Each structure stands twice: as structure tokens, then as C-alpha cells.
Amino acid sequence: MSLRLYNTLSGGKEEFVPLRPGHVGMYVCGVTVYDYCHVGHARANIVFDIIYRYLQFSGYDVTYVRNYTDVDDKIINRANERGIDSTLLAEEFISAFDEDMAALGLLKPTIEPKATQHISQIITLVERLIAGGRAYASGGDVYYAVESFPDYLKLSKRNMDEMRAGARIAPGELKRHPMDFALWKSAKAGEPAWESPWGPGRPGWHIECSAMSIQYLGETFDIHGGGKDLVFPHHENEIAQSEGATGKPFVKYWLHNGFVNVNHEKMSKSLGNFFTIRDILKTYDAEVLRFFILTAHYRSPIDFSDQNLDEARLGLTRFYQALANASNFVPQTQPRSNQPEREEIAELSDRASSLESRFKEAMDDDFNTALVIGHFFDLTRALNRVTAIPELAFDSAAATAVNSASNSMIKLGNVLGLFISAPSVWLEKQKHADLDETGLSSAAIEGLISERQAARANRDFARSDQIRDELAAKGILLLDSPQGTTWKCK
RNA sequence: GGCUCCGUCGCCAAGUGGUAAGGCAGAGGUCUGCAAAACCUCCAUCAUCAGUUCGAAUCUGAUCGGAGCCUCCA
């Protein structure tokens, strides 16, 4: 079974066949750097991060390009509001973006080009379009003549008549057709500007992505991605610009991720219902956010809420707890027994050895991470079944199966950016994360545990239970085991 | 208004023609001094209606409900 992915262009799943065997060129629209990133950006970038990782896992040599759009009306406006230079503002938010992506545990793309460093390529592309009769200069601006490109709107599957109602020519624009869009904008006083054949100006939105993707991936490449909201106009215009200039198909597979919603509404700046990545990471571990995002298919909408994040944390804890149990289970001494194989061990071995094929099957089907997580839970249960049986503690077949299961789960989880911590470290971190709210210190808890142990040894269960109840009232749960008593937050 | 998409157990969520994964919550049980954790068992016929088919959550049509795009947006 080979990789199949949903192509927005065709509206269905297609078998993935790269242009060059063994190689993949992938371009993902980054951000316009004028503000902090919100959870919607986090989702888009996490989704393409796992696609990048999975393609590599599948043996492809991937060139992953993600741009910064660092010149744009919004940047200029925001810079003016703050009374600073737009370059400075862009730099500030490029750094913020880098910090956020690093905090989310994303791999760095192969290339992260900036629009302002590709002005000459942009100008060349615009000249090509003018020469080919696809664009025209008007005043100091250059516009793309959408009527010159018959395939316009093939990605968003609309037609000009439907669109015309919403389109209009804004005052000051020198367009021939309402749907025409700017490739180059003449600079007003105080705006960043570059010399061009049409006078000083700056690139319009869209053209930088055509110029940079062609520069690094060629005139035709494999995968182009971004959020669903970019289908129109951004990606539609990229197609018009690129194919209009080169006469070649621009992109083979268009991938678009679904939105993050809040109360079933799109999270967006204009609705004011957005959460920035840095705010979220104050409360939730980056891996919890990633896990939450991966529990839904990347094309589906996902509802962002505390309840859902808390549930994600609970789910992740279950994995880490099982992995911790597994690492404790492996005998420190030589195995003493080799019992006739028990059903639990056989099941675990089966699940462990088939995990990778199940994983691939799910991921090959348009990156079905939710199904993968289901498989992880299945394996977790099988794992817990074995590690919960004390008699198997020194059994060599059991140890082998447990080892193989946890290794496999960690290996494949890592492909999704999951299970990246040492289980004990992660559990410890979760344990202390909520400790502040309880008003207790871990030393105080340990002291009470010792006191309770003493009471239990004396069979003073009244005192023992009193201690446990008091701690429970403050949000601390005690967990007794043959190895002693540990605790965790509710 | 036009164009897309979605509606699966209390909640989250896979499944897109062969008879409903998984997680959370809930019920019962094992373990435990009692608990907790873990494990075991139980827990849905897929918005509604009408079709196509040997067979549909999956295809078609209608209805109801929700969202997105059409203006900047991951």
C-alpha cells in the first residue's frame, strides 16, 4: 500500500507519485509576520511538520520550504501604529515565530526564505507575466489579468460570474477587471520600496510565494500546503502567476488543513476569539497540544477548548504511564523463568510486531493520525495487561514482548513528534505542573506519605485513611504499589 | 444570494458499499486493610425521510441543523 493523499485540486484522494523518484519538493505557506501566532497557525505548522516527518520516514529525500512574508500592507500598518520601521517589526515577529515553532517542537524546514530577499526574482517573474500578456502595468502598479488565464479558479472550483458579486475595484486601484490582483504596488511615501521597471514599489501578496517556490523547488513541484483559507485567493493566484509565467503545471498535490474552531466558530483575529501559542504553552505542554491536534484528521475542523486539551493530556499520560511501567518491568536481573507462552504475551507480541504496518497503513491513507493514535491505545492496553501481572516480572518472553512493544511505540510515536520525553521525566513534570494549585510542596507530601506508611505498618488504618483523605481533598492522589507509595495530582 | 464542507454513543473521534476502531465519562468485577492506578466485562445501527443495491453510516435526492469561502486570515 502506497501513500495516498487528498488533493484539493482534484477533490479526491490520489496515489502519491513524486516527480523525481525518491525526492519530494514541498512548499508550505508560512506567516505574514505582523503579530504573534495563534493556535490556528500551530495546527497548520504541526500538520505539515508531521507530513514532513512521515515523508522522511517513508524514505523520501524531502526539500521542505516554508516562507516568511515580511513585506505586506498589514506589516506596514502595524509598524505605523507603533511608530517603528516595518523592517524592525517584521524581524521582531520572525523571531517570535521561530521561538513559537521551536517551543512546539517542530523540525526546521530545509529552507525558510523571506520575501524581501527575493525581490529580484519577483520582478523577473512579473516581467515574464507582462511579456506573456498575463499582466499589465497601470500607474506604478502591475496587475494580473485574470481573464487571460482560462484555468483561473480551478483550485477553488468557482467561476467568475459567482465571484463578481463580491469583487469590486477599490478607490485608487487601476484595474481593468474587478478580479485582477496586484503583483506589484507602487510605494507611497514612507513605505518600504524597491526599484523596479515600474518605479519604486513592493510586491503584492501572492507573488512572493510563486517566486520563492519556483526558485527553490523548480517550476513544477510535488506538494504545496497551507490552511484551507488560503485556497482562495492566495493559492488560486499562485497558480495563475506560476502557470501563467511558465506554461507548466505548478503543483501536483495541493494539501489544505482544516481550521481550529472555538465554540464551533473559526478562530480568527476579526472574531477576537484566538489564543496565541505562547499563551497556550503557559498552561499546556507543547506535546499535549500536538497530541490534541493529531487526535483529529488534519482536514477536519477541530474544536479548541480546555476540556479537549485536558482530555488530550489525560490520554498522553496514559501512554507515558504505560511506557514507564514497561521500562520498570524489564528485569534488572537475569530472567528466572520462561513460562509456557501466555495469551497476554502472545497478544502483546502480535500487536507490537504489527504496529508498524498498521501505522503505515493509516498514515498512507491521507495521514490518518487519529487512527494511528487508536492503534497506540490498543497496544497500550496489551502492554498494561502484561506489565500488570506480577508473576511475569522475571519472565524472559514477557520482557522481550514488553521491550519490543515500547520500543516500537516510541519509534513510531516519534515520527509524529510524540513520546519524545523519557516517561519518568514526563510523568514527573505533569505531577508537579499542578502542584502549585494545591498549595503543597512535594516534600510535605512525601512526609505525609512516610507518616501514613508507618500508620499502615501499625495497622492504624484510621490514621492512614485520614492522611489520604486530607491529601485527596487538596487534589493529591496516593497510589500504593508493592514498590511503595507514589502520588499524583488529580 | 453563489460555491464548498460537515452532522457517528453523554463528550472527543476513526470508519466513505459488506454489516460500527479508539479515548474520556459511566456501570459491574479482579486486585487492595479500604482506596487509587492497572486489568477484565458491559455501554451506539451512524440528523430525518425517500430511493439505488443481494447488502449503505458509507451512493442518489429531499428536508432539518452546523461551519467555511466569496474582503485580510493557518
Image (cartoon, coloured by chain):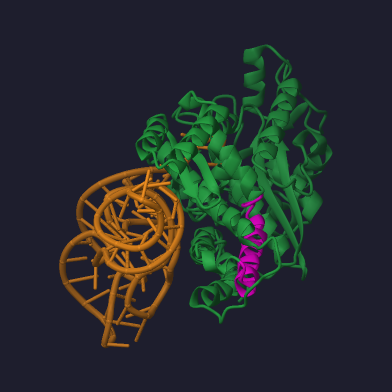
Say if A349 sits above or below A279 in the image: below
Residue A419 visible to an observer of this rendering? yes
Q: Quadrant of residue A208?
A: top right
Residue A177 visible to an observer of this rendering? no
Which residue is depicted at the point 45% across and 30% down? A273
Residue A425 shown in magenta: no
From the viewer's side, name the closer residue of A158 and A38.
A38
In this rendering, would A134 be left or right of A256?
Answer: right
Which residue is depicted at the point 48% across and 62% down? A374
Residue A400 shown in magenta: yes
From the viewer's side, name the closer residue of A374 and A129.
A374
Query: Looking at the image, which residue sits at the far front?
Result: A458
Prevailing secondary structure class for the magenta stretch in the rendered image: helix
Look at the image and give the colour of chain B: orange
- The span shown in magenta is A394-420
Q: Position of residue A142 (x, y in %)?
A: 70, 36
